[in-house]
Amino acid sequence: MKCFLAQDLTTVRVASGVAVIQPEADYVDLAGYREVFVWLDVREVTPTATPPTIAFQSAVTKDESLFATILSASPSAVGLSVLSAIPELTTPFSRWFRWQLSAPVGAAGDMTFRLWVVANRSGRRPFNRSITTPSST
């Protein structure tokens, strides 16, 4: 498993019905990784009644039309959330990972957050690994 800081502590303000996308220079390259766990550390969010939604997106290249949401959250309180994207259970992800923050129509908002991504390399099974011993002939 490897840990990536996908977004250092930042405050993002969004207008009603508008989306703010992470700058392209800050996308995380997850080439060769299979399972992804996202640690969303929310320090402040307003409004709490209709909070902004943060979507975690992935694409095989940095082409805007190829990005698809693999996970999303609408935290209405501060704290740490852990979300997982395991290909067998969720929408598959590709090489590039980014976030997108959007506010619902009719409600502007903001969120102060930090984002960590923990990923496992393809082909590695950190758990339930069986041990084999050579057979004697």
Image (spheres, helix red, strand yellow):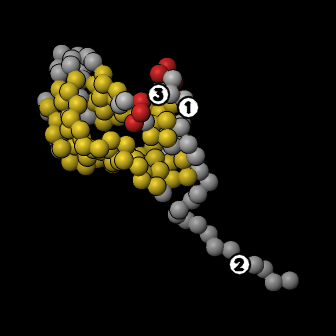
Q: Earlier in the sequence, mark 2 or mark 1?
A: 1
Can the viewer see residue 102? Answer: yes
Q: Residue at x 37, y 30 (%)?
A: 23
Q: Residue at x 30, y 22 (%)?
A: 19
In this image, 72 relative to 11: left or right? right
Tag nearer the camera, 3 or 2: 3
According to the picture, the residue beneath numbered tag 3 turns out to be: 68
Tell me the number on the disc at residue 112: none
Q: Nearer the viewer, residue 112 or 53?
A: 112
Q: Assess disc 3: are there few (<14), some (14-19) or many (≥20) residues with their C-alpha within 10 Å of its C-alpha.
A: some
Mark 3 vs mark 2, CA separation in Å: 44 Å
- On the image, the x and y values in percent for residue 118 come to 42, 51
According to the picture, the residue beneath numbered tag 2 turns out to be: 133
According to the picture, the residue beneath numbered tag 1 turns out to be: 60
Location of residue 47 (image quadrant): top left
Q: Secondary structure at mark 3?
A: strand
Q: Nearer the viewer, residue 24 or 40?
A: 24
Can the viewer see residue 70? Answer: no
Q: Residue at x 26, y 46 (%)?
A: 41
Q: Amino acid at mark 3?
A: Ala
Q: Residue furthest bottom?
A: 136
Q: Amino acid at mark 1?
A: Val
Location of residue 133 (image quadrant): bottom right
Q: Amino acid at mark 2?
A: Thr
Q: Secondary structure at mark 2?
A: loop
- On the image, the x and y values in percent for residue 85 come to 45, 43
Q: Earlier in the sequence, mark 3 or mark 2?
A: 3
Mark 2 vs mark 1, CA separation in Å: 40 Å
